[in-house]
Image (cartoon, coloured by chain):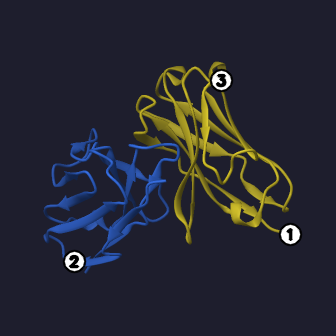
Amino acid sequence: EIVLTQSPATLSLSPGDRATLSCRASQSVSTYLAWFQQRPGQAPRLLIFDASNRAPGIPARFSGSGSGTDFTLTISSLEPEDSAVYFCQQRSNWPPFTFGPGTKVELK
Amino acid sequence: QVQLVESGGGVVQPGKSLRLSCAASGFTFSDYGMHWVRQTPGKGLEWLAVIRNEGRHKYYADSVKGRFTISRDDSHNALFLQMDTLRPEDTAVYFCAKDAGMKGILDYWGQGTLVTVSS
């Protein structure tokens, strides 16, 4: 089973700041990595698939990069509605599909 | 637009069974694989099962293999999760999710239904 770790656990930033979130896989997942946003009380929402492809309707301030074992989700300029938990998920080697533990982005 | 609505959650005693449903709309249900995923504060998001669009091929997480059964009814645009021999550690919010094409890209999720296993 591929284990995903995310850092930092919590990110506290101000509106307009740049957010950089990291996801690391225990073995290579090529580019088969997705990022999700989950606001409180809501379902996860797909942001990025296959490392760098934005899902339909996702604002351009969200971007993904990386391959192999190291991946980054960047939010170029934080908006108040970006306050949420962000998860990564791999689809390289399954079953099972696995998720990271999440990074909480808090806006000051 | 794509909508997924889970139902069937509730409080159940350990060892008992529960059947979750997921009503799908806004897309051609029979064309897509579907997943169940659960979430707990302690373990985060845990993928449980996927069923291919044809309904014959099903895959499970080890933690639920032999206890949970995923199924679908394409005539009613519905996905199911039969959960047997429930344990307290199965307490979670259960989500159904659509696959973009049986590729493990979970592009739409329902709002979830809470299952509590407790005596």
Residue visible at 25% across and 68% down in the picture: A80
Instruction: Please report, as a chain letter, where disc 1 is located.
Output: B
Residue type for callout 3: His
Depth-wise, is mark 3 or mark 1 nearer the camera? Answer: 1
Quadrant in which the C terminus of chain B appears: bottom right
Q: Tell me the SS state at disc 1.
A: loop
Q: Position of residue A53 (x, y in %)?
A: 23, 42
In the image, what residue occupies the spot 85% across and 62% down? B13
Q: Quote the CA–CA distance across marks 3 and 1.
A: 34 Å
Residue B119 image label: 1
Q: Is residue B95 above or below residue A76?
A: above
Mark 2 — residue? A13
Q: Chain A: what color?
A: blue
For disc 3, the chain is B
- Vertical side of A61 occupied by A92: above or below: above
Q: Nearer the viewer, residue A96 or B104?
A: A96
Please name the amino acid that badge 1 sits on: Ser
The residue type indicated by label 2 comes to Leu
Q: Report the chain shown in yellow.
A: B
Q: Secondary structure at mark 2?
A: strand
Q: Assess disc 1: are there few (<14), some (14-19) or many (≥20) residues with their C-alpha within 10 Å of its C-alpha.
A: few
The chain holding disc 2 is A
Q: Is residue A61 left or right of residue A34?
A: left
**Residue hosting label 3:** B76
| Nearest-to-viewer mark from 1 and 2 | 1
Location of the N terminus of chain B (image quadrant): top left
